Image (spheres, rainbow, N blue to C red):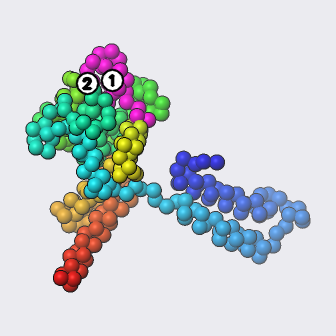
Amino acid sequence: MVYRTVQTAAHRIASIQQFLAWAADPPGRGRRSEGDIVSPEELQAYRSRLKATFEPLRRAQGKSTRPDPLTQKQDELLEDILSPIGLRERDVSFGRFPAKNPFQPSTRLRNWLLYALLRHHGLRRGEALKVKVGDVDTVGNPEVRIRRRPTDPDDSRVPAPRVKGMESVVPLSRDVANGIKAYMSDFRLPGHRCKGTNYFFTTRRGTPLSTSYATRFFRILRKRHPILDGVTPHALRHTWAEEMASHLLAEKGDSEEVISLLREAGRWKPGSTMPQHYVQNAIQSETNKIIRQRQNRFDD
């Protein structure tokens, strides 16, 4: 049997342990015949053996599967491959991309926008794919509104992308806002005229972009460049969160305030412990940096 996540496996293991403990206790099942009687000592010993057998499995299966953030080389390579030419020099043309970009010329701008929203704006994959044209504002202070829409009659994708976090408004960089303007006029509009979908990210035929494509997008990159092993949509958001936690910690200093701000920026639900993990990582990273600097003084 194959489980979709290690968390699911941990739940199954816990259920098996509970069932075996229940099955070993006839009175607890409502059985009272003499042949079913088990002494309290035997029952306790059996439960202890169950715990010794199953607890290590539950701990191993229940470990966090959060991906590592991008390495500096991975981060730089993705920027070099996917970004429009001239972006760093502030002389960008959204119709020109590096020759080593592995995607069709007509899809490169769309793919860069998807990447930029995940890596530099912290959107989850489902959040990005659920964005509709009306959620994007490129006038004045550019922004994108993240909305849940759990039951949306416009969404015929199977499986449909999901927005897991809280609704929010995410400010957009000026480069991304300008890229969106070019995308809406040069790529999306022809297909939109044919299909009429309200979703922002579409195929060349005008249908909403699927979660499977977003997954395949990164699989293509990993296949072309082995150094990108482990790079997924969630790894990009993870990198953004680590980066944001470090920035907020340097600006604010107070870890509790940083946790609150990061929870808001990342759209985590109240009570989520994820922001604490990122802030703790940022504190540990800064501590290690100070320790290395101190050691280097002694080495000199």
Q: Position of residue 219 (x, y in %)?
A: 41, 42
The amino acid beneath tag 2 is Phe
Q: Is residue 64 left or right of residue 20?
A: left
Query: Residue shown at 37%/30% (left/top)?
Result: 209
The amino acid beneath tag 1 is Arg
One can see residue 170 in this view: no
Q: How many marks are shown on the rendered structure?
A: 2
Query: Residue shown at 35%/52% (left/top)?
Result: 227
Helix, strand or loop at label 1? It is loop
Q: Position of residue 243 (x, y in %)?
A: 25, 57
Q: Is residue 249 left or right of residue 212?
A: left
User: Relative to 111, is 265 above or below?
Assistant: below
Query: Residue shown at 20%/76% (left/top)?
Result: 293
Q: Which residues are magenta?
A: 187-213
Helix, strand or loop at label 2? It is helix
Q: Which residue is mark 1?
A: 204
User: Relative to 8, is 257 above or below?
Assistant: below
Q: Which residue is mark 2?
A: 187
Query: Residue shown at 88%/62% (left/top)?
Result: 33
Answer yes or no: do the residues labelled 1 and 2 have beta carbons within 8 Å?
yes
One can see residue 191 in this view: yes
Mark 2 nearby-residue class (10 Å; few <14, some 14–19, many ≥20):
some
In the picture as drawn, the residue positioned furthest to the bottom comes out as 298
